[in-house]
Amino acid sequence: MNFLPDWPLSANALFFFGFLLFCGSLGGYVAHRWPWLPSITGFMLVGFIAGPNVLHLVSHEGLAESRIVVDVALGLILYRLGLSLDIKQLLRDRSLMFISLAESALTFAVVLAGMRWMGVPNLPAAVIAAIAISSSPAVLIHVAHELGARGPVTARAKSLVALNNVLAFLAFAALLPLLYHQVDAPLLTILLGPLYQLLGSGLLGGAMGLALHIAARRTKAAQQYQLALVVGAVAITLGAALMLKLSPLFAPLVLGIVVRSIERQHLVANIEFGPAFELFFIALFVYAGANLHVAEMVAYAPAAGLFVVGRSLAKWLGVGATSMLLKVPARPAITTGLLLIPMAGLAIGLVNNTVALFPNEGAIVGSIVLAAVAVLETLGPPITARALRSSGDELDPARGYEAPEYWPPADDAEPPPVAAGNPTPLAPSPRD
């Protein structure tokens, strides 16, 4: 019996999780030496250098091993994003839905026209345009947390990002029958496959949201366990989605939306995750930096460049123009649109679904979208930081000044965070 390890060594998910955190911490330290540089950029940069593109300290196979960690991180981020979208408030203030629909329609039309102009076939171009509607919750949540940004622009941007991701998933699901027809799938699959994905993911997220709400109410006397309830509910949702072949991206988003919409006393909707949540952001963005596809970026640079420019302008101008039509002052209207420019998690998930189910179309979709994601995730953090600084929102709660009321008042305003195990609202801190 050989007591020595096999050679070459085979790493595991735990090793790569530690590797992502270790490298990310170094990148974050470097970023903090330059105040103008968001820490996300530092995380991505050190991942890019350590990954298969430069130093090869971690391979593509190793990145695949750590995928489960990234799925959990993204699931928690999407859950938190879902908490920013209150259905009751959305029904009372329909301007938010109007802005989102107008901006999403403009984004879809501009990207579709651009891809067709670049010679991309109709169906892959439509799939790319549907994915373009999505926005990155991780960048907005992390940069807002880092700057201590609180106010109407930040709150509205989070709701618009959540709506973007819901609409992107709906648009993608609407195109699935055409994709199935393209590959001569059975009629039953063409008709029921998209419905199963959409309704199944929604029902899973809704059921877990209701279960989490009931469990939180029953255990509200012992609030120290509520954070564990939240993380457990998100993990169950992700695991069930994978087992049932549902969307592990849409289900946790619905989970957060349902929890926020049915709670009246904010038992778990306002739990403060604390500094430990930073671990998941670090792992996610180091992974994104290591997983940049440089060859695809070069090969599809013209189409990806047009995608980036067209999508960014559509979101910026779509939100800005629609908001000003609704009598929102120019500064918050324009800066809110800039906060929707980053794109990553849901886009990558939809690309992976397309590649797995429809390899021919997926090759085109993946090459263009992943190249664009690399650019948008690199430029997104500094754009987001700049937009938040220019928005008029409060950036450092310790300064004590109030954000201006640019938007209609504020059932939008988020209640003060509640720490797990402490029923008393926390005073805001500069890092919240």
Image (cartoon, grey):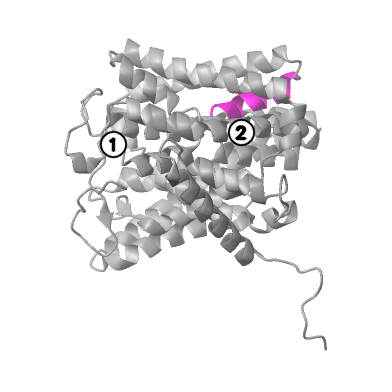
Residue 422 in view (yes/no): yes
Give the answer, above or below, for where 29 lies relative to 12: above
Q: From what the image shows, is residue 405 above or below residue 147?
A: above
Total of numbered circles in the picture? 2
Crowding near pointer 2: few (<14 within 10 Å), some, many (20+)? many
Q: Find the residue positioned furthest to the front.
A: 33
Expressed as whole percent of the image width and height from the top left, the position of residue 356 reads 74, 43
Based on the picture, tell me whether residue 171 belongs to the magenta stretch. Answer: no
Residue named by callout 1: 395
Q: Is residue 389 above or below residue 206?
A: above
Q: What span is in magenta?
A: 121-133
Between marks 1 and 2, how big is the CA–CA gap? 27 Å
Q: Position of residue 27 (x, y in %)?
A: 53, 49
Q: Secondary structure at mark 2?
A: helix
194 lies left or right of 135 = right
- Quarter assignment of residue 128: top right
Binning the other alpha carbons within 10 Å of mark 1 as few (below 14), some (14 to 19) or many (20 upward) gives many
Give the residue drawn at x 57%, y 49%: 286
Most prominent secondary structure in the magenta stretch?
Answer: helix
> Where residue 412 sits: x, y (%)?
27, 34
Q: Look at the image and say whether residue 125 sits in the magenta stretch.
A: yes
According to the image, label 2 marks what residue?
373
In the image, what residue type sits under mark 1?
Answer: Leu
